[in-house]
Image: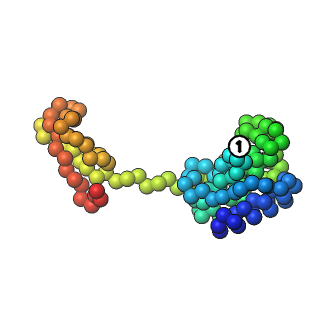
Amino acid sequence: MDDQQLQAWVERISLESFRVPFRHKATFNRRLRATGGRYFMKSHNIDISWQQYETFGPAEVEKIIKHELCHYHLHLQRKGYKHSDPEFKQLLKEVGGTRFCKALAPRKPAAYKYRLECRACGTHYLRKRKMDLRKYVCGKCRGKLSLVELPGARV
């Protein structure tokens, strides 16, 4: 699905569920991860998360679109468009939108690339980033540190 198909889809949902046309722009945003969509109050445009569409499919994204259209139509009518407003909650319930989008799988954390070893007491510390050993000492005995690159680490 591309942005033109999304635009047509949002316009159709707006007419079917709200009986009011959507006259602005709807696009996919591939960077959105923590939210399903965004409504911009100044431009009245809507962004929809591409990851939500890829992961959960059109049924879930339709609920997200309805959520963003609730913000859109209530804002243009100068009614309560915020999540806490009763008008927003009521309209969202009527059209069958979702209050919260499903959570995406968390990104895999970066593996540790370096190990710092204390020359005096042997304590080791795992690090993701390289650091300047002239500035730091061991936290336990204040001894000098040495840097060991872990196998399989990509630098």
Q: Nearer the viewer, residue 44 or 123?
A: 44
Residue 147, image x, y percentages? 19, 47
Image position of 91 with respect to 50: above or below: above
Q: Position of residue 96 (x, y in %)?
A: 78, 53
Q: Which residue is mark 1?
A: 41
- From the viewer's perspective, tell me whether residue 49 is left or right of residue 142: right
1 vs 142: above or below: below
Instruction: Report the quarter where the C terminus lies.
Output: bottom left
Q: Is residue 112 left or right of residue 32?
A: left
Q: Is residue 3 left or right of residue 114?
A: right
SS for callout 1? loop
> Residue drawn 85% across and 53% down?
20
Q: Toward which corner of the image does residue 135 lie, by quadrant?
A: top left
Image quarter in which the N terminus is found: bottom right
Amino acid type assigned to the residue bearing label 1 in the image: Met
Outermost residue on the left side: it is 120
Residue 138 visible (yes or no): no
Q: Name above or below for residue 3 compared with residue 135.
A: below
Closer to us: 19 or 113: 19
Please indicate, yes or no, whether residue 47 appears anywhere in the rendered image.
Answer: yes
141 horizontally vs 15: left or right: left
Q: Residue furthest front?
A: 43
Residue 93 horizontal/vertical position (percent): 80, 47
Q: Give the residue drawn at x 83%, y 49%.
A: 94
Residue drawn at the location 60% of the way across and 56% of the way down: 29
Q: Residue at 16% of width from left, 44% of height from top?
A: 146
